[in-house]
Amino acid sequence: MGRILVNYYIDQILKKQKITSFLEERGIYPDRKTGEKLVYYCPVHSGDNDPSFIVYPEGVEGRDYQTYHCYGCHSGISIINLKSDLDKESTKESIKYFLKGIKIDNKDVIDSIIEDISKGELDTEYQKDIETTLLMINNTCREHLFNYRDYKEISFFEDFFKETNKVARSRNIELLEKIYDMLIAGLDKRVEKFQRRQEDKEISSTKWVI
């Protein structure tokens, strides 16, 4: 079967972050163990007199990460959902929390995807993932603007993002991949132009005294 989540970064969170460890950090421990399942008093809803919160190990229903389900309040699935329910925050905020402190390197992402494919651990269709490609584009642009930022770069990338989002909404993965390749190939030239503008600015601002 295909992967449950198509987003590469979310997938990495689910594989690396354990629900059991997350609960333990908050002082929440299982009431008992049934086979490989851990049974808790539900931390999400109050009044759970009979433990109804079950943490399932990897492998259940084909998932390669821990999942949970509360048979009392019917919350469940992933550690991201759990944090959202516990802290009453959006899924986006929970994702940001788990990504905090993780440096995302585009080369590492690509290498990891290729490695998973070569091991047969990743569907080849996963390469055709709109969300992953869009995240890689956005991350590359963000890193570039962090180091090289002036009015021309800001203006260029504002227009670039608008057009890229149009392509993403059309679900044209082939064109989106071409955009990413062109972005990577053209960044060096953009850096050169940026540095040239900075040099010109310094020269024009210099006051020559004769």
Image (spheres, rainbow, N blue to C red):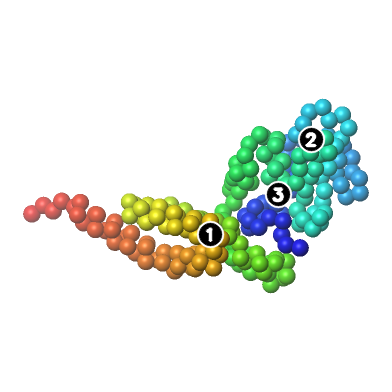
The kind of residue tagged 1 is Ser
The kind of residue tagged 3 is Gln
Report if the CB atoms under discs 3 and 2 are less than 8 Å apart.
Answer: no
What SS does tag 3 mark? loop
**Residue at 72% in and 56% down:** 4
Q: 10 Å neighbourhood of mark 3: few (<14), some, or many (≥20)?
A: some
Q: Is residue 189 above or below residue 57?
A: below
Residue 58 position by quadrant? bottom right
Report the residue that reaches farthest toward the left.
Answer: 210
Counting residues from the start of the chain, the first of labels 3 and 1 encountered is 3
Mark count: 3
- The image's mark for residue 17 is 3
Q: Is residue 102 above or below residue 47?
A: below
What SS does tag 2 mark? loop
Q: Position of residue 99 (x, y in %)?
A: 61, 48
Q: 10 Å neighbourhood of mark 2: few (<14), some, or many (≥20)?
A: some
The kind of residue tagged 2 is Cys
Q: Position of residue 112 (x, y in %)?
A: 63, 65
Quadrant including the N terminus = bottom right
**Residue at 33% in and 55% down:** 152
**Residue at 70% in and 51% down:** 14
Report the residue that reaches farthest toward the bottom.
Answer: 118
Residue at which label 1 appears: 170
Is 166 or 148 nearer to us in this picture? 166
Q: Position of residue 144 (x, y in %)?
A: 43, 57
Counting residues from the start of the chain, the first of labels 3 and 2 encountered is 3
Quadrant including the C terminus = bottom left
Q: Position of residue 202 (x, y in %)?
A: 24, 54
Residue at which label 2 appears: 73
Residue 60 is left or right of residue 113, and the answer is right
